[in-house]
Image: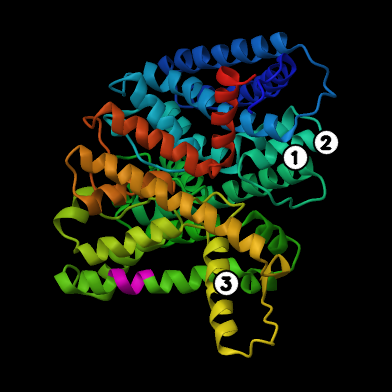
């Protein structure tokens, strides 16, 4: 029997949700400052409206909850808050974008915001090349906030330490603490991310001036936007041509480095910062990434060689390998136009990129997909079973792997990993079936569905303003569920059902 939630449960959820909304609303001050910097005064009104709506809704929830600061959240509360916060922030964050006049509908603006927050990078914005600097920056700031985590923002500024804070943190699909205290973990994530932002912006801005030929103000703006979306594995770009716009091999190399750096687990960033760089190469995720990246790159390059599309190695790297790295890190930056996947690439090459997207990046990172940790564990489990069949029945086979520390491969871990992996595969194919229902070929529907659910952002051209509303909502749900790795989304669904049918 499902028990109906009590009023106290609703008040606790409202309390923490209100704090998260306040923290998210405060981030709208940044595009307001960008508007002032570039002397664009119309966006100030748009973002002020969004800011005030967020404040009003956040304070309203806190007033309704009326709970002391010492109130702790349970596991159920943390999961419901995390999953619902992303939806509420999507609706609020879409307000200034919709008011900009560059979206055909409010649903399209919501799609764009969820795509950013979930670090996906699929776009529905119209006339992007003439979008204001403030709105364009907001699109890229979304991945920076969502990549580190909306909950992480609230933990840094508004939520006190305690077991309730950790439950909120886990609800956002992060179950590894870097520091002993979850608040300190959140602060580290933001400190290191801001440091990388400064360094990455300077690096890309310098390349923009010297290699692309942009003005200094524009190069800094583009550098900041590209780094935020690249490090947080989103794939948004300030121009409609994405990375093609820059026509610079040096710029492409820098973005590849940015994508790979964003792929890694924040714990590994911590080890690098503290001098334990050997951990980077010992970790099972790094090794799984190098192995799978090699395999999918070979598959893609063989597929491209079949069609004789790119005649030299440099073109193969800039067009083929770049897409593979972008897909495997779940970033979504592209050096080809979306229709080229259909018009020029062979099905084998497209399949290689699809596999890369489906596998994804690291856990506790900004990347999406199944994750290298799970791929590595499944590979080790298969190897262990083979060894068990080849050895004596009396022999005891034990397997260790290294992820932050030496761990034993236990049946419980393998079962959990396989369940989540199966969940991703099911979501990939459910979205593909809906795409097929609307007349798209299976391979390209599966490509687009996986791009949404694995939070990648590459597209075969299915994602566009004219696609049916049902398909837009499907991709929004996939991006949301894929980013949160299903558990908190399922808990939210159970919570709603218990409110309706519980006793």
Residue 392 in percent (x, y) is at 63, 90
Q: Decide which of 54, 174 is in the foreground and name it.
A: 174
Residue that numbered label 3 is attached to: 381
Q: Is residue 34 magenta?
A: no
Q: Secondary structure at mark 1?
A: helix
User: Mark 2 packing: few (<14 Cα in 10 Å), some, or many (20+)?
Assistant: some
Q: Which residues are magenta?
A: 296-300
Are the residues flagged by discs 3 and 2 in contact, CB closer than 8 Å? Answer: no
Residue 418 to residue 28: above or below:
below
Instruction: Judge left or right: residue 321 versus residue 309.
Output: right
CA distance for labels 3 and 2: 36 Å
Are the residues flagged by discs 3 and 1 in contact, CB closer than 8 Å? Answer: no
CA distance for labels 3 and 1: 30 Å
Residue 464 in percent (x, y) is at 25, 35
Q: Quadrant of the N terminus?
A: top right
Q: Identify which residue is drawn at 38% across, 59% down.
A: 252
Rendered image: mark on residue 166:
1
Q: Secondary structure at mark 3?
A: helix
Residue that numbered label 2 is attached to: 162
Q: How is the image coloured?
A: rainbow
User: Mark 1 packing: few (<14 Cα in 10 Å), some, or many (20+)?
Assistant: many
């Amino acid at each position: 029997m499902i028990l109906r939630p009590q009023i106290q449960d609703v008040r606790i959820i409202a309390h923490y949700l209100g704090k998260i909304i306040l923290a998210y609303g405060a981030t709208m001050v940044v595009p307001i400052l960008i508007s002032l910097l570039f002397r664009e005064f119309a966006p100030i009104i748009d973002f002020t409206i969004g800011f005030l709506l967020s404040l009003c809704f956040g304070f309203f929830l806190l007033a309704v909850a009326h709970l002391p600061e010492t109130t702790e959240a349970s596991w159920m509360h943390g999961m419901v808050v995390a999953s619902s916060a992303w939806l509420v922030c999507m609706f609020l964050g879409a307000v200034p974008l919709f008011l900009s006049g560059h979206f055909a509908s409010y649903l399209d603006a919501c799609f764009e915001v969820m795509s950013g927050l979930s670090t996906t990078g699929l776009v529905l914005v119209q006339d992007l090349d003439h979008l204001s600097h403030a709105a364009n920056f907001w699109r890229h700031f979304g991945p920076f906030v969502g990549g580190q985590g909306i909950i992480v923002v609230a933990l840094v500024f508004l939520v006190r330490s305690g077991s309730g804070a950790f439950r909120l943190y886990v609800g956002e699909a992060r179950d590894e603490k870097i520091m002993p205290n979850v608040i300190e973990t959140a602060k580290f994530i933001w400190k290191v991310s801001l440091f990388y932002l400064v360094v990455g912006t300077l690096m890309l801005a310098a390349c923009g001036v010297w290699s692309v030929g942009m003005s200094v103000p524009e190069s800094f703006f583009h550098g900041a936007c590209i780094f935020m979306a690249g490090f947080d594995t989103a794939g948004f770009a300030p121009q409609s041509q994405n990375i093609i716009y820059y026509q610079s091999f040096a710029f492409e190399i820098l973005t590849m480095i940015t994508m790979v750096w964003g792929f890694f687990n924040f714990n590994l960033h911590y080890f690098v910062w503290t001098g334990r760089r050997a951990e980077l190469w010992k970790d099972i995720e790094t090794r799984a990434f190098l192995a799978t990246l090699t395999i999918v790159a070979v598959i893609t390059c063989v597929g491209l060689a079949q069609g004789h599309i790119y005649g030299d190695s440099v073109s193969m790297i800039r067009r083929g390998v770049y897409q593979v790295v972008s897909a495997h890190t779940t970033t979504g930056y592209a050096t080809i136009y979306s229709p080229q996947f259909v018009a020029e690439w062979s099905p084998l090459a497209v399949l290689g990129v699809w596999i890369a997207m489906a596998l994804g990046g690291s856990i506790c990172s900004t990347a999406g997909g199944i994750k290298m940790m799970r791929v590595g564990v499944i590979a080790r489990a298969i190897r262990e079973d083979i060894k068990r069949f080849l050895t004596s029945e009396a022999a005891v086979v034990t397997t260790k792997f290294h992820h932050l520390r030496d761990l034993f491969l236990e049946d419980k871990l393998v079962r959990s990993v396989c369940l989540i992996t199966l969940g991703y595969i099911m979501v990939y194919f459910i979205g593909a079936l809906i795409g097929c229902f609307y007349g798209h070929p299976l391979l390209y529907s599966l490509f687009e569905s996986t791009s949404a659910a694995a939070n990648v952002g590459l597209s075969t051209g299915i994602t566009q303003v004219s696609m049916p509303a049902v398909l837009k909502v499907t991709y929004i749900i996939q991006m949301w569920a894929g980013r949160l790795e299903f558990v908190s989304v399922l808990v939210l669904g159970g919570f709603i059902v218990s409110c309706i049918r519980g006793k």
